[in-house]
Amino acid sequence: MVIVAFLLAFVYQALKPMQDANVALDVKKQILYSLNIRNLDGAEAEAKYKEVVKKENEVDGQKVYECQIDGQTILVANLKGMGLWGGISGYVAIDKEGKVFGAYFNHESETAGLGAEIKDSQAWQEKFIGKKIFDENGNVILSVVKKVEDPESQVDCVTGATLTSNGVDAMLKDCLKNVKPTKAEEE
């Protein structure tokens, strides 16, 4: 029994650097996805990340990445929240006008075919592009709703996944409230 425990500990330690590198690469890919840059292998993603991500800041304890895409400064905000069955996360790219440039969402354990659509459906993520994030007072108005009444700032929820969609909505409001396009440009 002691030998098995030792072997498991050894294998864990031997594989840890590779696991950490894979996690770091996955984070970089998710940031690139939010910038509408997809379908890159590992080496391509590493190179593209180095090319477009110019600076990493923290705004009120939240990571914000300053990026350059076609000469345009885009902020990418890291989001974390709760879905139906566990944590949800994502990245929202914000242009200088305070609109969504792109979005990517992820989950730990949402229901396949329902709540998991926040990650699995690129078409749903693309519904965020061009949506207004802030009102004239800087309040977050970007919303995920059951019935879209303001197409400038609202995205239709994932069908059959109301609680996960509510979690995405709450995550957007909570995580974007302190991230404004001008904040990163002033630093």
Image (cartoon, rainbow, N blue to C red):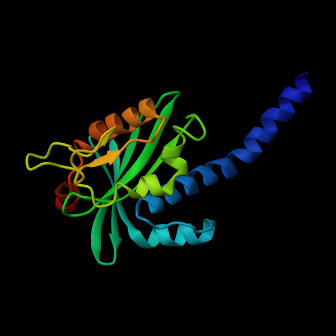
Left of 58 or right of it: where is 14? right
Left of 72 or right of it: where is 102? right
Q: Which residue lies at the image location 35% right of the left edge and 45% below the top edge?
A: 156
The one nearer the camera, 182 or 166, is 166
Q: Which residue lies at the image location 84% right of the left edge and 27% below the top edge?
A: 5
The one nearer the camera, 68 or 171, is 171
Q: Is residue 32 above or below residue 134?
A: below
Observer able to see residue 82:
no
The quarter in which the C terminus is drawn is bottom left
Q: Which residue lies at the image location 45% right of the left edge and 57% below the top edge?
A: 31
Observer able to see residue 168:
yes
Question: Across the whole image, how many numbered discs are drawn on residues?
Answer: 0
Left of 165 or right of it: where is 23? right
Q: Position of residue 33 (x, y in %)?
A: 47, 60
Q: Position of residue 61 (x, y in %)?
A: 32, 40
Q: Is residue 12 above or below residue 91?
A: above
Q: Which residue lies at the image location 56% right of the left edge and 54% below the top edge?
A: 26
